[in-house]
Structures are given as structure tokens and as C-alpha cells.
Amino acid sequence: MRHLLAAGETRGCLGPPEPDNGSDPGGMKTRASKKGNEYVLNGTKLWITNGSIADVAVVWAKEDDGEIYGFLVEKGTPGFSTLDIHGKFSMRASITSELAFQDCRIPLENKLPNVKGLRGPLGCLSQARYGIAWGAVGAAMACYDWSLQYAQQRIQFGKPIASFQLVQQKLVWMVTEITKAQLLVLQLGRLKDEGKARPQHVSMAKMNNVQIALDAARLARDILGAAGIVDEHPIIRHMLNLETVNTYEGTHDIHTLIVGRDITGLDAFGM
């Protein structure tokens, strides 16, 4: 199954977060107990993208020794069930699910090798956050391009609204912040190529780029006025999706604390 996932020949989902543990993965409650030649999983995962359509779930759970390990759970395994989350106003194109494990038995070989503790799930998250830092730039660019064209065509007081100072100020802010965000992830990509990128670099890029993208979407919505809330234009879709991305794969606040700990040497996460 691992080889099929690596080759992209089967669908997977990743399950670190739980109903009571999002920003604190170390507090996860899902358990994996070794029973003879099997592991028995019990627990719940929440906010899992593609959970109900995945052929296999990569699930992180605590063993009896208190350490966190990764396990592959195939769709259809007895004791493994999913429930889709409905009523989302954001990221509606994706399926978001709850994963439940009740005396779910899997073979010993379904345990991921050479991965122990939070290094495994956090390593996966770091890669996802890097992708988000780029994707947020794309959303910001789309909002900027659309609002610029709209401002050049929308006539008020006998001239395009792009000729007004306050509208130009919004557009200038957007293109400037987008350029800075592009340079940030470009440099981060170069560091990754050189093997020098650190999780703290990724946190800074994710935190910054999602925030400027969300601000850009809000400014674009403002430029479009009432037209900015209808699906004839893409602005409101980007704005709502970015509201989710702001807390997706680590909240803005958590990434702030990750960077803050790195530059001060002081941990502000707990008591």
C-alpha cells in the first residue's frame, strides 16, 4: 500500500487532528495497542480532507509506551468508519470527514517504520504548509488581477474607479505585498533545494502569505463593492477559502509562536 501511495495510484488521507486536539498534537487520545500479531486502534480524528473517499488513512496514534507512531488503515477495515462534515461555507470543493476507530485491528506491518514521536506528523505538516504558502500567493494574485480589471472598467462619477486615489492605494498595497510574498516563498524553495530550509522558515512563509492573501481578498471585495459577494466573480470564493486556510495546517497564532520561540529561545506554548 505504501508503494501505491508513493506512486499516486491510490488515494490517501492524513489523520493527525482530533476533536479535542488540533494545535496540540502531543495531546492526541487515539490509541494503538499491540495485541499479538495485530494493532488495535481506538479513537477519533476530525477535519480530515478526503477522509471518506481515501483508500487508506495515515493515522497517528499513541502506543502503550506513550509515544506517537503512524499506522496505515485501509478503507473497509472492520472497526474503521467515516462521517462527512456538511454545512461548510469554505473549501466546499473538498470532502472533509471524521474518522472513527472502534477496536479496529490492523496487521503489525501497517505500522510506519523509522518514525517515532511528533517528528512524523509534523514533518508531513511542514511539507503541506510549504505548499500552502505558494497556494496563498496564487489566490492573492487572482484577487488582484480581477479587482484591477474591474476597477479599470467600472465607471463612477464619469470615470473608472481605478482613477481614484483610494482604489489605487488598495491595488498598490496588494501588488506590493504579493511581490514580497513571492520572494519569500522563492527563497524558501531555494533553501529547500539546498537542504537548508527549517520548519520555522516554513511557518513564517505560511503565516505571512496566508495573511496577506486574506487581506488582499478583503480589499478586492471592497473594490468590487456589492459585486464582490456574488459568484459571478471569484473574490468571495477566495476570501472564504482563505478564512479556512488561515487556520488550516496550523493557525496564524501557532505559527507566530513557532517563529517567536525560534528567535527568542523561549517557549510560549504552555504554562
Image: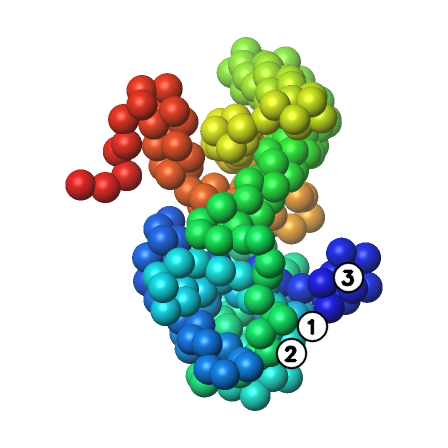
Q: Which residue is mark 1?
A: 55
Q: Residue at x 57, y 53 (%)?
A: 114
Asked if 134 appears above or below 17 in the picture, the reply is above
In this rendering, is residue 61 above or below 145? below
Instruction: Give the labeled residue for mark 2.
Output: 75
In the image, residue 186 above or below residue 86: above
Residue 103 is left or right of residue 26, and the answer is: right
Q: In the rendered structure, which disc, 2 or 1, sits on the residue that comes first in sequence?
A: 1
Residue type highlighted by circle 3: His
Q: CA distance from mark 3 to mark 2?
A: 16 Å
Position of the C terminus by quadrant: top left
Q: CA distance from mark 2 to mark 1?
A: 5 Å
Outermost residue on the left side: it is: 271
Q: Which amino acid type is shown beneath numbered disc 1?
A: Asp
Q: Nearer the viewer, residue 16 or 180?
A: 16
Residue at horizontal 54%, vertical 28%?
A: 198
**Marks 1/3: CA–CA distance:** 13 Å
Q: Residue 190: horizontal and vertical position, in percent?
A: 69, 21
Q: Nearer the viewer, mark 1 or mark 3?
A: 3
Q: Could you tell me which secondary element the residue under label 2 belongs to?
A: loop
Query: Residue 81's spot in the image, x, y percent?
Result: 53, 81
Q: Which residue is mark 3?
A: 3
Circle 2/circle 1 CB separation < 8 Å: yes
Tag 2: amino acid: Lys
Q: Residues within 10 Å of mark 3 (few under 14, many from 20)?
A: few
Q: Dot 1, crowdedness within 10 Å: few (<14), some or many (≥20)? A: some
